[in-house]
Amino acid sequence: MKTSKLALAAAFAVLAVASAQAQQSVGRTREAVQAEAVAAAHAPNQNVTRGSRGADPFTSTADPEAVYKQAVDTAHAANQNVTRGSRGADPFTSSRDPAQVYQEAVATAAAPDQNVTGGSRVNSRVISTMQNPALTAAQAK
């Protein structure tokens, strides 16, 4: 029993010397490390997990003037509290030429075989041989 205590004390001594040498090699003195340990031991809330005492203080990364200007612009915006579509449909803006859309609609409406279906039990296709009067009139112009 006595030898195990002696061996344990020797191990702690070797560990302390190794620790002191490791601290000395980084450029910190034993007194500096001890002062740091004492300061850490006396620090408030040292054993409290982060966030358990409320949120951390907020530090903004945005420019306060820019945020203020954006808030003022948003507050003065027209219909700021109106959901989309509550004042009627959004204005329609076409991405195609209205004349071309009109010609396609007239040609589709004037097609002689527009009500004929193309499929049957034997997967046949109906191929129209009839002339579309709207297309012939458009080509004649």
Image: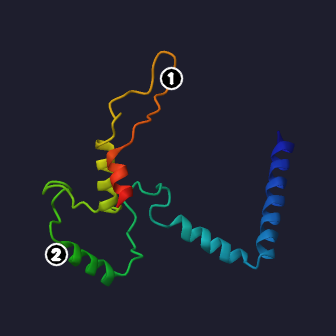
Residue 35 drawn above or below residue 118: below
Q: How is the image coloured?
A: rainbow
In the picture shown, does residue 122 fall above or below 9?
above
User: Looking at this view, is 49 or 29 the one in front?
Assistant: 49
- Looking at the rendered image, the disc whose residue lies closer to the viewer, 2 or 1, is 1
Instruction: Give the residue at x 39% y 77%.
Output: 62
Q: Amino acid at mark 2?
A: His
Residue 68 percent location from the top left of the image = 26, 79
Q: Where 27 sits versus 78, above or below?
A: below
| Figure quadrant of the C terminus | bottom left
| Horizontal and vertical percent position of residue 118 | 43, 27
Residue appearing at x 29%, y 49% in the figure: 106
One can see residue 54 in this view: no
Q: Which element is circle 1 on? A: loop
Q: Position of residue 39 (x, y in %)?
A: 55, 71
**Which of the pair 28/136 is nearer the observer?**
136
Percent coordinates x, y for residue 102 in the rendering: 29, 55
| Residue at x-position 35% and y-position 33% | 113
Residue 124, label in figure: 1
In the rendered structure, which disc, 2 or 1, sits on the residue that comes first in sequence? 2
Residue type pointed to by label 1 = Ser
Residue receiving disc 2? 76
